[in-house]
Image: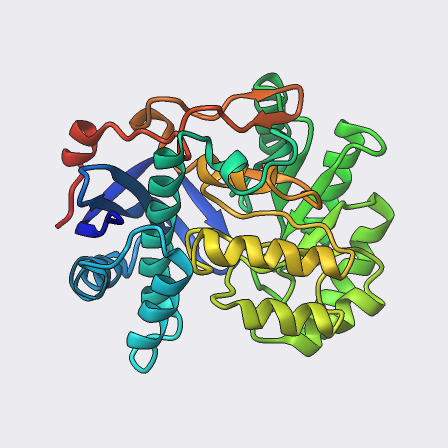
Amino acid sequence: MRATIERVEAGLYEIPLAETLTDSMHGEMRAFEIVTARVTDSEGAEGVGYTFTCGRNGGAIHDILGREIAEIARGEEADRIERLWRKIWWATHYGGRGGPTVLALSAFDIALWDLAAKKAGAPLWRHLGGHEPRVKCYAGGIDLMLSADELIAQTERNLARGFRAIKMKVGRERLSEDVAKVAAMRDFLGDEFPLMLDANMKWTGDQAIRAARAFAPYDPFWLEEPCEPEDMAGHARVVAEGGVPVAIGENFRTLAEFRSFIAAGAVTFPEPDVTNCGGVTVFMKVAKLAEAFGLPVTSHGAHDFTVHLLAAAPNASYLEAHGFGLDKLIEHPLEIDDGFATAPERPGHGVVFDWRGLETLRRA
């Protein structure tokens, strides 16, 4: 008899940040919310997942996960992940089809894959097929309002931590300010050092092309989210006319969005976030879709989970490492060594939360 899902528990926590983070569109961020999913099967085994927000809507995600998804999933075979994903997708489709519903589904799906890999006695990256456990990793800064000197000081700290690729924010009100900071970073880092730029959806297509052309002499590895994620035509124009590669996808909620952008030539580096694209199930489909089109896949957020997914993808590019304040709340924080992160050999994804510590941060 196959193990069935006995219980789905949702938790909502507010994680304070050590310093206020700022980007071009989300403004100042002083805390992140995380919503955890704990799935227990009829044999007593548990899988864990989570998703996060920039500080709002966590309550909606928590409610969908703990009430709607828990009810749909109870009694289902835990290892029929594709079937269960589709059942939840269509059961919640009319009132969902994106937003908090997909974030809740993502956390649940991550927990199912964690559970499946644990029961197989394998680390998740091997359970997914396995390719290369060492994955290139960059430091993803949320640092729009830092001066050039402050940005370089932050970069020095990241280099000391083992990073060999850096991402900085752009999208100031005056493009000249962005260009000056990019020039300062290129001068500090030297030629050919991977330097990514992230505009967080700041510009129209015309503005983004102008910005991309201004950045091109400084050889950015990519320009991320130059336009709103709904603007496929704008992104296609930036790819064709801007002179720099384009990364986008952290705000996509469906496989279909990735398919449309890739087919339209509107993205160079597809960038799914496992915590909001539909989970491991969809992330790996995006990676395969990108591979079919000869594109590298990168990632956004949740680096402790995502290192496994990129380690299973032969077309992996860079893993983003984000400073969301979770390191102090998990048993084995990701380690960076000379520009690489290594997927662990612990069964499942290997992320073990300090549940007692999290309880002090509980919101619901």
Looking at the image, residue 169 sits to the left or right of residue 331; the answer is: right
Seen in the picture, residue 190 relative to 1 is either above or below; the reply is above
- Where residue 148 appears, as percent x and y from the top left, is 65, 36
Image vertical order of residue 254 relative to residue 244, above or below: below
Judged from this view, the residue extending furthest toward the front is 1
Say if residue 173 shows up in the picture.
yes
The answer to which quarter of the image holds residue 102 is bottom left
Front in this rendered view, residue 179 or 237: 237
**Residue 165 percent across, percent down from the top left:** 68, 32
Q: Is residue 339 above or below residue 173?
A: above
Quadrant housing residue 242: bottom right
Query: For residue 231, what is the image quadrant?
Result: bottom right
Name the foreground residue: 184 vs 129: 129
* Of residues 200 and 282, the one drawn nearer to the viewer in this rendering: 282
Q: Is residue 322 left or right of residue 232?
A: left
Q: What residue is rendered at 30% in x and 46% in y?
A: 34
Count of numbered tags: 0
Residue 172 makes an appearance in the image: no
Q: Residue at x 22, y 57 (%)?
A: 62
The type of colouring in the image is: rainbow
Q: Is residue 264 left or right of residue 117?
A: right
Is residue 272 positioned above or below 187 on the image? below
Q: Position of residue 131 (x, y in %)?
A: 65, 36
Which sits in the foreground, 306 or 30? 306
Left or right placement of residue 91 versus residue 303 in this view = left
Residue at 78% from the left image edge and 65% from the top image edge: 239
Which percent across, then down, holds residue 291? 72, 55
